[in-house]
Amino acid sequence: MPVRSRALPIALTALLFTGACTGSGEGGSEPEEQVAQVTTAAPGERLTLVADEDPVAAAVSASRTFFAVAGVAVLAAEDDRAGMLLGASAAVALGVPLLVGADGNRVEEPVLAELDRLGTTTVLAVGDAAPAPESESESDSPSSSPSEDDVQVIGVPAEPGAVAELLGRDLAGTEPVAEGADVAAVAALDPDDPAALLPQGGGRSDEDGARAADGELPEIEGGEPLASTLVLVTGDPAGLAGTATARAAGARVLVTDGATDPRASEELISTLAEDDAEHVVALGAGFAAEDGLDWKLETAATGTQLPGGGQVLFPGKMMVALYGHPGTGALGVMGEQPVEAAIERARAHAAPYQPLVDATVVPAFEIIATVASAFAGPDGNYSNETDIAEIRPWVEAAGAAGLYVVLDLQPGRTDFVTQAELYRPLLELPYVGLALDPEWRLGPNDVHLVRIGSVAIEEVNAVVAWLADLTRENALPQKLLVLHQFRIDMLPGLERLDMGRDELAILIHADGQGPQGSKQATWQALQGNAPEGVYWGWKNFYDEDVPMLTPEQTIAQVSPLPELVTYQ
């Protein structure tokens, strides 16, 4: 739980909406009209993180981020939803910060400090934040007399008519806000013509006979709008005041609907790519827990999206792939036809899954790039490396058609990183991932088909690091790394798999074949041996499965639901 500093009495001159009076200065002369200065402050860095959990602290931090000077500020009570919403409307209309307090007589120490930093001379207290009316005895008490340096507080009820009258301008009608949509509604406020936000089913409308505030706001000399600043908010209610302050400063605000990884939001990716934002402010505690927020933001700013949208593979997508090698049907169904026909066949395999799942179904190829060989070959590694020029037309045609592509390695006596490096130019494409096939990873004296191969977890982790680094260095969307497996001893030490690289989505692909009972037993055994956080793939074999599952059976019988279904 966040710990707040103690609340302090606020020594302010209260111009109350009931029970107060105003008068002229000495000798009957009218007081000189003051102009309240407002100066916005553009963040100094490309990315600024404002990550307070507490609404009071979050509002203060946002004010410090976007404003250097504000002769006027708006105050609303944290637990007064109507006051917070209408306070946001008022702050955006005035172009000043919205701060959060308990009530007009007691506010948090950080709020007082922020008012002092801003040079605030007038506070507009909306709703429950407005000071309670003083009794006559309290008004006459010496202890209530303010000093000449005190701040004026103008209290106003959370009623659109009263607020509009005090602002001296009409608001753009009343806008009822559904529960849970407060931050989005504030983010959408137009500083030139803000609506009066009210809780849906509650609050008061313009026709409700609003009480007027007793007091007047000074003239405000507004600050320069922060047009080159983009603010990200998750929609957490704790960020409501900060969102209003950002809009009041002229910054644009994008609600990510809970997402803290910029790569996960298609709207944010498009906005960053098309926008000229020089500064980005991530507003909300959730962003503090997002490791690598800086590089993820720069990746999102490229605008490059994966097949199916966004820059993150899972959740939200399901891939259905054809497996094989270009030009031959001996290694899988993908190569049984030319590339254009294979693309259409992949689409035909993927289509029946779409009505069965909530995710976006993406057709895919898994192309065997290096093929295990019974012969040592010139390099002695028992693996035939396909020339990149032979694979590239298939990869590029698939990408142009909206397919994802996975390059499969069967390395023999060499290591996976060495072979992966051969295909770096293809792996630098945003829609190309990598698959490791330990069945075909040999020891220094082994040959294929004598025993089933395996790979040490250290070598797998070396691939994780290599592929993740390639992805980050090229600002690419998240890449898929597939680990083929049908026996536990193919991936010894799997519990030590490096799962800490968000550049990758790591998936274990269960390659068991034969009777469905045996396949399910393999599936369950692999599940029990895997580290938390991996994704899952299932393979349907045309000839070896007894029987091969239909799409409907695959979805109904394979649990948990696989993120990748491959046909061989």
Image (cartoon, rainbow, N blue to C red):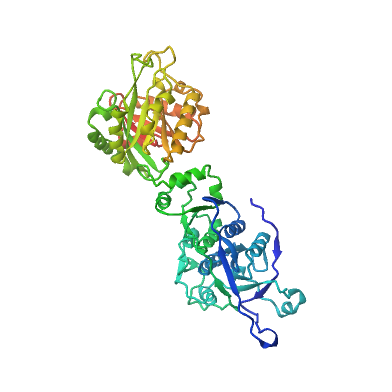
Q: Hey, which quadrant is residue 490 in on the image? A: top left
Q: Nearer the viewer, residue 534 or 38?
A: 38
Q: Residue furthest right?
A: 142
**Left or right of 181, for residue 62:** right
Instruction: Please report the residue visible at 22 percent of the width from the left and 30 percent of the height from the top.
Output: 337
Visible residue check, residue 152: yes
The mark tally for this picture is 0
Position of residue 476 relative to residue 383, above or below, is below
Position of residue 5 relative to residue 308, above or below, is below
Q: Hey, which quadrant is residue 345 in on the image? A: top left
Q: Hey, which quadrant is residue 31 in on the image? A: bottom right
Q: Residue furthest bottom?
A: 28
**Left or right of 548, for residue 163:** right
**Left or right of 375, for residue 528:** right
Position of residue 270 relative to residue 95, above or below, is above
Instruction: Please report the residue visible at 28 percent of the width from the left and 24 percent of the height from the top.
Output: 543
Q: Residue furthest top?
A: 445
Percent from the top left, x then y, of residue 258? 48, 50
Percent from the top left, x then y, of residue 254? 46, 55
Visible residue check, residue 436: no
Position of residue 196 relative to residue 547, above or below, is below
Percent from the top left, x then y, of residue 295? 49, 43
Q: Report the quarter where the C terminus lies.
A: top left
Instruction: Please report the residue visible at 76 percent of the width from the left and 74 percent of the height from the top.
Output: 143
Percent from the top left, x then y, of residue 477? 41, 41
